[in-house]
Image (cartoon, rainbow, N blue to C red):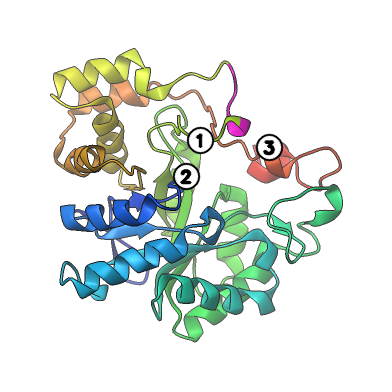
Amino acid sequence: MQSIELNDGSRVPALGLGTWKSAPGEVGAAVREAIRQGYRHIDCAPIYGNEREVGAAVADAIAAGEVTRDELWLTSKLWCDRHAKKDVVPALRETLSDLGVDRIDLFLVHWPVALKRGKQMPKSPKDFIPFEKLPLEETWKGMEDAVDAGLARCIGVSNVSAKKLRALHSVARVKPAMNQVELHPYLAQGDLRAACRELGVAVTAYSPLGSADRPDVLRAADEPRLLDDPVVAAVAEEADATPAQVLIAWSLAHGNVVIPKSVNAGRLAQNLAAADVALSAEQLARVDALDLARRYVTGEFWTPPGSPYTQANLWDE
């Protein structure tokens, strides 16, 4: 399994299993099957509502002798209502309890958005805490406490712009190891990836297949479907691969960690086999040319009328 070296010398498996949108009752079987097939990186988050089931599946796989804890890379995230420095370590302890482990390999700040304690999703503008009152840098001090306590091997961020990442990196005692962002050929994130390379921050691509299965509330009626793109289809035919495998191979070729989600055993196997799909420089260039700067996960749920967060200050674009 290809791996990516992080800034502390750790190596994260480059191809992992995403668990966003994997329903309770399905995700455990998917994790068990993924581990049997050879996946060694599982990406989780408490907001996905399935970490206990993921943890039970991991425990079962270890008990069955299919894998050891040291062979697995587990990633989880800090939700937006736990951004106060004092709340970070307790939040991580809850995640560790749900997953049934004593340390997480990578702990990420899920969004650069702060909510009042207990507000999992905003129902009114009063549920938000403005960035100026609870900046990412303050949250990061709690993330560093998690490292100091031995509860997290590495820490990082998610959905963070180059501007925010540079500001955080300049003051961080423990430098961010990862930035997990939406990344695929329609949103290639070239400038952000360049900034991450400059700062020594690795990149994880979420929604690498275009997230066609995300909830309807997050979908636009006229959005292009990445898996149906004719260029991707043509490259797939040339490479004797599926379109999904081309999209995964494209991201791996650019040095990203990739976390496609599936609960289907056949697709899990196809996604894992994408690590062996070698695209030529010419094929990569054709896929590179598809960039539309098109977000599927726009973050509009953070930017309703009256919110201190806007599309402009969320993405800094």
Residue type pointed to by label 1: Arg
Disc 1 to disc 2: CB gap under 8 Å: yes
- Indicate the quadrant where residue 244 lies: top left
Question: Which residue is at a point 45% across and 29% down the rendered structure image?
Answer: 212
Residue type pointed to by label 2: Lys
> Which is nearer the N-term, disc 3 or disc 2?
2
Residue 169 locus on image (x, y percent) = 55, 64
Q: Label 3 crowding class (10 Å Cα cut-off): few <14, some 14-19, many 20+?
A: few
Secondary structure at badge 3 equals: helix
Residue at label 1?
A: 214
- Mark closer to the observer (3, 2): 2
- Mark closer to the observer (3, 1): 1
What label does residue 21 carry, if any?
2
Residue 316 locus on image (x, y percent) = 66, 42
First to last magenta residue range: 217-221
Q: Main secondary structure of the magenta part?
A: loop
What label does residue 300 carry, if any?
3
Question: Which residue is at a point 50% across and 44% down the rendered structure image?
Answer: 192
How much space separates mark 3 and mark 1, taking CA atoms?
A: 14 Å
